[in-house]
Amino acid sequence: MNEGKREAILGRIREAVRVAAPRPHEGSGRYDSNAIEVPQTSREWLPSVPLDAEGRLNLFREKCSQLRTEFRFLSGQEGAAAALADLRNKQKWTVLGSHHHPMLDPLVQSLGLETLYVEQHPQSKSLERCSVGITACDALIAQTGSILLTARSAGGRALSVLPPHHVVVASVDQLLPDLPAAFELLYEKYGDNYPSFATLITGPSRTGDIERILVLGAHGPRDLTIILLGTNA
Amino acid sequence: MDQLFPSVGISVVRIFEKLGHTVDFKESILCCGQPAFNAGFWDESRDIAVRVLQSLSGEGPVVVPSGSCTAMVKNFYPELFRARSEAAVAEQLSRRTFEFSSFLVDQLGVTDLGSRFPARVTFHDGCHGLRELQIKRQPRLLLERVKDLTLVEMEDQTSCCGFGGTFAVKFPMISTAMGETKSASALSTEAEYLVSNDSSCLMHLQGLLNRQNKKLKTVHLAEVLASY
Amino acid sequence: MSFTFASKFKIQATKVTADLDHRAKIRAALKSYETARDERKAQYQDWQAARHGAASIKWESLNHLDAYLVDFVTKLSARGTKVFWAGNAQEARDYIVALAKEKRAHTIIKSKTMTSEEIHLNEALRQAGYEVVESDLGEFIVQLRGEAPYHLVFPAMHLTRHEISDLFHEKLHSAPSEHPEELTMIARKELRFKYIQADIGISGANFGIAETGMISITENEGNGRLTTALPKVHVALMGIEKVIPRLSDLALFLPLLATAGTGQQITCYNSLIGGPRQSDEPDGPDEFHLVLLDNNRTQLLADAEQRDALHCIRCGACLNACPIFRNVGGHTYGTTYQGPIGSVITPHLRGLMDWKHLSYASSLCGACTEVCPVKINLHHHLLHNRRNAVASRPDPSERAAFRLFAFLTRYPGLVNRLARISRPLVPFVRVVKPILPAPIKGWLSSRDLPKIARESFRDYWKKR
């Protein structure tokens, strides 16, 4: 569109980088500071993650508790339905927001509330009415207690951020060890056909902008619940 | 050190002679050229530094009782003389220049000098020694072995005292605020002495403490180690 | 002009450094950050290697920036993103204002972007008649006060809850509150409506991924997500230096940015945006515009010695560690980017002669370099700026002083004698303070002069 400026800027860049900059110095000793280490993975530097499934699950649980994410590990659909019904009653949910997904559909129906499905209500602003947004996700990450979701896996952009409560339903085989694995998954799963939006959610919305004191529910959901379904889910 | 703190030099000489080493002092050197270098006047700094290179030609180790001056010779001379005819000499001098406490601990392997200093002290890390030369452990190892000395670490022990050479006179208000914070940390340890391996930090802090009529005294590490 | 910026800095610094409340407030605000940051760092298997890895990735992308930018833009365009290359601030502003006009926009909502501060976008949009609302809580607060952000990451860290309560009471007519939580909810309510109403959302970008053609936005509050989800048009403003090669690089950069920036393991939301709403997606903007900004970044890029300053991921760690920042405060700098990184890059972005004073306003303690997660040689670059300033236009009296000093160092004996003669005069220096040169006055403002020793080391050595 403005090729002229594009070529002018690229020209300045090419001229500028004609001389290479000094390379990053002072490695940790394990790395040759003259060789540019372009890491294939940062796994060996980041906080470590247990190798076994149980260890990962425990780490994820621990992270959730630090982050004030409500985490429920349940063996099947019935347990999940009961947990959701419990939340519905406690928080007096009136309208649900959700998207169609084999794992979500029976749960959402079991709640017996008015439900806005994003597929039928593409106007995301209508989600403002919802007490809760219930979504699926692409993966959970043990290392950080995060949820990875995309516009395609979790009903668009607004459903998981506009309502005051976000409930994520996932199955235990979606639990990944760490961030490198999460980005590998994103890359492998979508190939060249990426959704326009993906996000890593780590705990309920928060701010520390007033005297650096933590407050939850700044603009996004104040409550974040993760329902993890066991193997037979 | 020469005019304001000669006892630092005298202490260094005594310590090395007690350890059985021969000490030489180059009377032709007055300054390493750091003030000019830091102010951006690299030509003027080189003018001074060239003569330091000449005076210190040879093989033996060069020991400097100041982290700041050491960093100048060890880290910044190579940059100052990069791509110049003196580059190789500057590199050679850099390799054999050492800060006093790190020379004792890392080069000579000495920590116990048989010193005695009966007082409660706190230690201030000069920033150049700390961050340009990674000297933190060495002075503490030396102080721990001093008889009757109690070392109390202050809060924010690694934060800058605010001297910073010409910075102290160009931006006295910032330098003073930093110095006040530092001396408050030192005072709250209830130490009698504030020890450092850099006289310039101590000059600044002592100046502030005197003005505030505080009893806390500053003293160089070498002076502590030369007390028996 | 040089006189103006430098003297403003000095006047403001004099005021703020004497403000003991300010000093205590900033210290307290950063205390919990320091503890959290250190705990997080300790959890890394190898923090130093992680820094080195991040610096290496940035080195790679900056030294081949042309190729990575072309990749990045090609991928984005292929998926319907409209990319605009802005050579300077004016071009970026004009494009965005024209877009607002074309869309017949009324309200524009913004999530935190320092780059928009750099190009003074809000003023331009307001002058063109649009309502511009900052949605980040800290930014919202300083916008209500008509102030610039105090800190890259913590825009309102200089304010107490009481000041914020008074501000909200005055501007939003809310009931006074002592509780950060209640104050946050007042802002939440106020802004909710704006998201729904806004025609255009403007965001920044923390990273651009060349491999996949996406921008990455880091935040905690969710305002960035709402800004990029609800309005029909999303505009992202991004400096050209923010491109990194691969998607997997984020696995390193996102935790590094959070740890260094706020002491979190990773921030609450890290979103990737690779285009407008796609046909199989229920919502999202119909249009996504990416404005790529040069604005003298290529000039800094051309300085190979300081090119690493473009590694910066705007985490703010160098500000938090900097004793100058802590004492003069963020507003004193008078720059978009405060603290050590601002002192390094502002002379490149806005002129060395006007902004060199920031490079001198440093004790060169190196705390900034030590904490920088992408290993920018910050305090050495302050030295480089000083050298460059002297090389292009030295201050004549300073030059004369250093020449005299260099000359005197040739004659240590003479200096020794001069010192001996002046020794008895030192106690009287304070008496004649008014007629002394500025540097000595500066010293004496708060400090006593050191005494000249009875016997110099030189004399001692001679006598041995």
Image (cartoon, coloured by chain):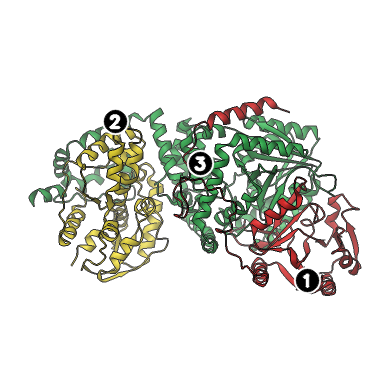
Chain colours: A red, B yellow, C green
Local secondary structure at mark 2: helix
Residue B30, can we see it?
yes
- Mark toward the viewer: 3 or 1: 1
Tags 3 and 1 both on a single chain: no
Q: Residue drawn 49% across and 32% down?
A: A19
Local secondary structure at mark 3: helix
Provide residue B82's location: percent of width, then percent of height.
35, 36
- Which kind of residue does numbered mark 2 sit on? Ala
Provide residue C52's location: percent of width, then percent of height.
50, 50
- Which kind of residue does numbered mark 3 sit on? Asp
Local secondary structure at mark 1: loop
Q: Residue drawn 58% across and 52% down?
A: C257
Q: Is residue A194 above or below residue B21?
A: above
Tags 3 and 2 both on a single chain: yes
Residue named by callout 3: C308
Provide residue A101's location: percent of width, then percent of height.
86, 60
Name the foreground residue: C49 vs A210. Answer: C49
Q: Is residue A86 above or below residue B81?
A: below
Please tell me how crowded label 1 is: few (under 14), some (14-19), or many (20+) other residues with Cα within 10 Å: few
Residue named by callout 2: C400
Residue named by callout 1: A231
